[in-house]
Image: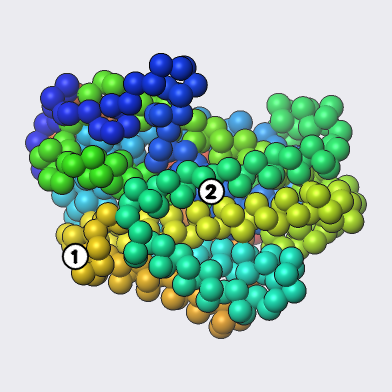
Amino acid sequence: MLPKAKRDTKPATKRSKRHPTAPARRFFAKLGPGVITGAADDDPSGIATYSVAGASFGFNLLWTALLSFPLMAAVQLMCARLGLVSGLGLAAVIRRRYSRPVLWFACTLLVVANTVNIGADLGGMSEVTQMITGVSASVWLPLYAGLIVALLIWSSYKTIARIFKWLTLALFAYIISAFLAHPNWAQVLRATFVPRIEWSVAYLATFLGVLGTTISPYLFFWQSAQEVEEDRASGKKSIAKRRGATPEELRAARTDVVTGMAYSNLIMYFIILTAGATLYVSGHRDIGTAREAAEALRPVAGNAAYILFAVGLIGIGMLGVPVLAGSAAYAVSEAMHWRGSLEDRPPLSIKFYAVLAAAMVIGLGLNYARVSAVHMLFWSAVLNGILAAPLIVLVTLLTSDKTIMGDEVSPPLLRWLGWATALVMSAATVAMVLAV
């Protein structure tokens, strides 16, 4: 059981120490783990899933961006508050509060889903690079995997965080692509605010896939772990020093997380819009991968949209894959009570880095084993959708527990949104199964 959290006694973190005079600089100074987490959510698997949604159903699923934003923001904010107040990552708190079967159920399914997702993302990045360069994807696969592992092992957390922040800019490619596609804006607005739901396996599976790749379990673990890393990077090496959060820190986290989740959902919206305005309209409705989406985009929307779509996927893959591998390593290390941090050198956290490297190697192996890229890309999102509901229940319960959060338990709005998110994810899963 964790001691009661303390208010106003925790020294300010680096993020909250900055006091730029300009409002814009003050705003951007507060951005960190939340924005990185939000951008990582739009990884190649997510891009493929959103492309499938737009190509298969046109603008009919645009409304899901409005549905998922408050739900996703609430869950990620609870995870951020958990890391800030407890000084521990999500798996470590679950280990201290619940039984080992509960802990290992969550961690095992997370690692399986992440490994499949890593394979899907590496495959998507390599195929798109082949499409641009003409060099075989089998050459790019180990190069991307090796580059990412090297970055995570030999760079410091500060360097990694700085690189990740710049990589989030790659997602602007999808906003530009959407405008280059020249959609019918009247239809876009109607589909955004007037949901049109179909009772079919394809529609419900796609809906669950969109929610699953947007409200993804690996982001829960990553968000809480990165809040802890921010504190470690500012000199708070022990749990006692990290425990508790000031009102200023909680406000900064809220700004960071809400901005990151808004960015994530905005990009999701524009990818669906782009695919709906081009692929669906032109009859290219059987899209299985992001590469197929990019290839089909060129004759419809032109070379500029095609290049932006492809380059954006590669850039955000370099952010998404490390987050997938890192969240798996954090979860397993916290569950096993191992030392584990991206700030540590490999000899100090050898088991942490071993888990990270193993997830990358297995994900890489799925591609060489000729596992269908279509199945990996899309069904990994569906699996995330199924797994998310019980994890959201755990997060909501943990952040409502005074023995963990002290005076900083989640406010009623966050709790209600947490339960609503678990209900929506569960209902979507049941509906898909019943429609089969």
Nearest to the observer: residue 421 or residue 153 = 153
The image quadrant that residue 256 belongs to is: top left
* Residue tagged 1: 348
Q: Number of numbered discs present?
A: 2
| Disc 1: CA contacts within 10 A as few (<14), some (14-19) or many (>=20) | few
For image coordinates 41% across by 29% down, the residue present is 29
Secondary structure, mark 1, is helix
Q: How is the image coloured?
A: rainbow
- Please state the horizontal and vertical placement of residue 102, each as a whole percent of the image: 26, 56
Residue 232's place in the image compared with 110, above or below, is above
Marking on residue 167: 2
Q: Are marks 2 and 1 in contact (CB under 8 Å)?
A: no
Marking on residue 384: none
What is the three-letter code of the residue carrying label 1? Leu
Q: Quadrant of the C terminus?
A: bottom right
Q: Quadrant of the N terminus?
A: top left
Give the distance between the C-alpha atoms of the residues marked 2 and 1, in whole angstroms: 28 Å
Nearest to the observer: residue 310 or residue 429 = 310
What is the three-letter code of the residue carrying label 2? Leu
User: Who comes first in sequence, dot 2 or dot 1?
Assistant: 2
Residue 131's place in the image compared with 62, above or below, is below
The image quadrant that residue 59 belongs to is: top right
Residue 35's place in the image compared with 417, above or below, is below
